[in-house]
Image (cartoon, helix red, strand yellow):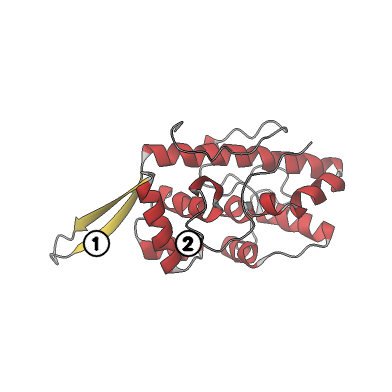
Amino acid sequence: MMAEISSTRDMDYDSSNAISNNPRHFIVLDAIARGMKSVDKIANAARLPREEVELIINDLSMQRLIIKEMKKRRFFGTSKLEINVTDTGLRMLNSKKQELHQQAEQLRQWKRSGDTTQLQSYMNSDNNRSWVPFMLFAGIMDILFFTSIMSMMGMALDPMESQMAAESGGGGTDGAGETDSGGAGASEADTGGGDFGGFDGGGFGDF
């Protein structure tokens, strides 16, 4: 029986949500891990409002998943904020990517076998669907593969998914989406296995 990710479909920022259950926090964390050090660059890459990114960055900093530092500019004497991911943040990010890679591989297996019932069940789940934008952003799921599934089932993309699709340009490395798209951090994840469980968001002590 397919397990669902414990998360929320509401993609609006909610500071009461646990970071581990908030896909937008992982989108921002992944952008930082890719080397984006300023709020503006992160907001542009993640296609999120600047104000929301600032709130998310504060959350990540409080949990010691990132470090915020003021760097003095050499010539102008002014300072600018630089943001870097911590080892703890990177481990948490890679753990989530590994979990989602396993789910993406399961989706590919269902598509190859023509199991539309399981695909429909997965995509109709608010919990699972809320992680799709992060999967697209991180390169865990190829946009052509995702849109082919949605088209096959007659389902429309939501606004966040559409933004991520626009960001990717609708391109991918595998065309039909039958192999990994090799996005950022893909080498960190194990794509094997079909039986997956929910991510335990009870805290960060294990990272």
Residue to which mark 2 is pinned? 45
Examine the image and state in which quarter residue 137 appears: bottom right
Which numbered marker is on residue 80?
Answer: 1
Examine the image and state in which quarter residue 149 appears: bottom right
Amino acid under label 1?
Answer: Lys
Determine whether, in the image, residue 55 is placed left or right of residue 19: left
- The residue nearer to you, when weighing 116 against 207, is 207
SS of the residue at dot 1?
A: strand
Determine whether, in the image, residue 180 is placed left or right of residue 26: right
What percent of the width, then of the height, locates residue 51?
42, 68
Q: Residues within 10 Å of mark 2 (few under 14, many from 20)?
A: some
What percent of the width, then of the height, locates residue 105?
70, 39
Q: Residue at x 70, y 43 (%)?
A: 4
Question: In the displayed image of the protein, which residue is found farthest to the front?
Answer: 16
- The residue nearer to you, when weighing 43 against 74, is 43
Q: Residues within 10 Å of mark 1 (few under 14, many from 20)?
A: few
Amino acid under label 2?
Answer: Ala
Task: Give the total of numbered labels.
Answer: 2
SS of the residue at dot 2?
A: helix
